[in-house]
Image (cartoon, rainbow, N blue to C red):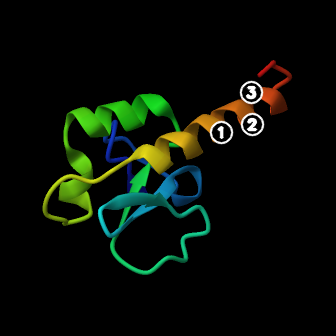
Amino acid sequence: MRTCVGCKERAEKSSLLRLVAVGDVIQPDPQARLPGRGAYLHPSLACLDLARRRRAFSRALRTAGSLSSTGLVEYLCGAESRHSIARGGTT
């Protein structure tokens, strides 16, 4: 069990996306193989928004200063569109 840094709900590790700080960038780690301290997030833009507003990433990843989440936003947008297509929706 892990806790989402966005909504603070506990969930199975397999249903959450692991994140690591690489320099000053938040990097998604779907295979959970990158080195370093990890934080977990539901793969949704809603949980990302909550985590950003609470400034949870720098606390959870124990980094000083702000972290860029541009790559993470792109990853989540792609993941949500792939999920929508799999459910029979449109892009």
Tell me the residue at 19%/66% (across/down): 62
Q: Which mark is residue 84?
A: 3
Q: Residues within 10 Å of mark 1 (few under 14, many from 20)?
A: few
Q: Name the quadrant containing residue 9.
A: top left
Q: Earlier in the sequence, mark 1 or mark 3?
A: 1
Which kind of residue does numbered mark 3 sit on?
Ser
Where, quadrant-wise, is the C terminus in this rendering? top right
Left or right of residue 13, residue 78 in this image: right
Between disc 1 and disc 3, the foreground one is 1
CB under 8 Å between discs 3 and 2: yes
Mark 2 to mark 1 CA distance (whole Å): 6 Å
Q: Residues within 10 Å of mark 3 (few under 14, many from 20)?
A: few
Left or right of residue 16, residue 37 in this image: left
Which kind of residue does numbered mark 2 sit on?
Arg
Residue 76, x across and y down, in percent:
56, 40
Q: Name the quadrant containing residue 74.
A: top right
Which one is in front, 14 or 34? 34
Residue 68, x across and y down, in percent:
33, 50
Disc 1: which residue: 78
CB under 8 Å between discs 2 and 1: yes
Disc 2: which residue: 82
